[in-house]
Image (spheres, helix red, strand yellow):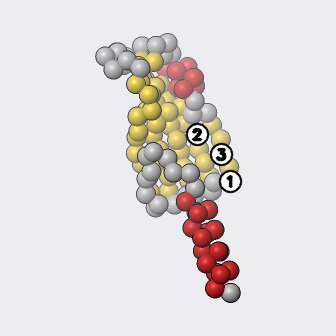
């Protein structure tokens, strides 16, 4: 019986961790921005586009948080850098936004 409890504890602990991102936030609430790509640090950021996706209960997700969607939203033709903004609340609601800066 003790072996079963130990095995169940190990399985629960490893399955609850999920995939660890390089930028991990808190368990209760997250709202942080992280750099993804810098192509030209000296480039002009005259245009800024955003594209988002939403996750509900880790069951449903919808939206387009791709770089192409963010470029199209602002009319960016030359990308200088890409950031991601992560927001989540108790794993109930999550939003990921790709922010593209360029000319």
Task: In the rendered structure, find residue 61 and report the number of the disc placed on it.
Answer: 3
Helix, strand or loop at mark 2: strand
Distance CA(mark 1)–CA(mark 2): 13 Å
Q: In which quarter of the image is residue 52?
A: top right
Distance CA(mark 3)–CA(mark 1): 7 Å
Of callouts 1 and 2, which one flags the residue occurring earlier in the amino acid sequence? 2
Q: Residue at x 64, y 74 (%)?
A: 7
The correct choice, above or below, for 5 with respect to 93 in the image is: below
Task: In the rendered structure, find residue 10 and report the number of the disc placed on it.
Answer: none
Task: In the rendered structure, find residue 59 and report the number of the disc placed on it.
Answer: 1
Q: Residue at x 60, y 70 (%)?
A: 10
Query: Can you identify the residue that label 2 sits on?
Result: 53
Q: Residue at x 68, y 87 (%)?
A: 1
Verify CB contact (< 8 Å) between mark 3 and mark 2.
Answer: yes
Q: Quadrant of residue 47?
A: top left
Of 41 and 86, nearer the camera is 41
**Does the rendering let one see residue 76?**
yes
């Amino acid at each position: 019986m003790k072996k079963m409890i130990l095995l169940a504890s190990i399985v629960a602990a490893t399955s609850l961790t999920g995939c660890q991102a390089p930028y991990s936030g808190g368990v209760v609430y997250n709202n942080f921005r992280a750099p993804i790509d810098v192509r030209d640090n000296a480039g002009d950021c005259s245009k800024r586009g955003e594209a988002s996706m939403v996750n509900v209960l880790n069951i449903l997700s919808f939206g387009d948080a791709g770089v192409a969607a963010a470029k199209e939203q602002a009319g960016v033709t030359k990308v200088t850098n890409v950031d991601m903004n992560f927001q989540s609340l108790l794993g109930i609601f999550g939003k990921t936004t790709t922010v593209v800066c360029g000319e």
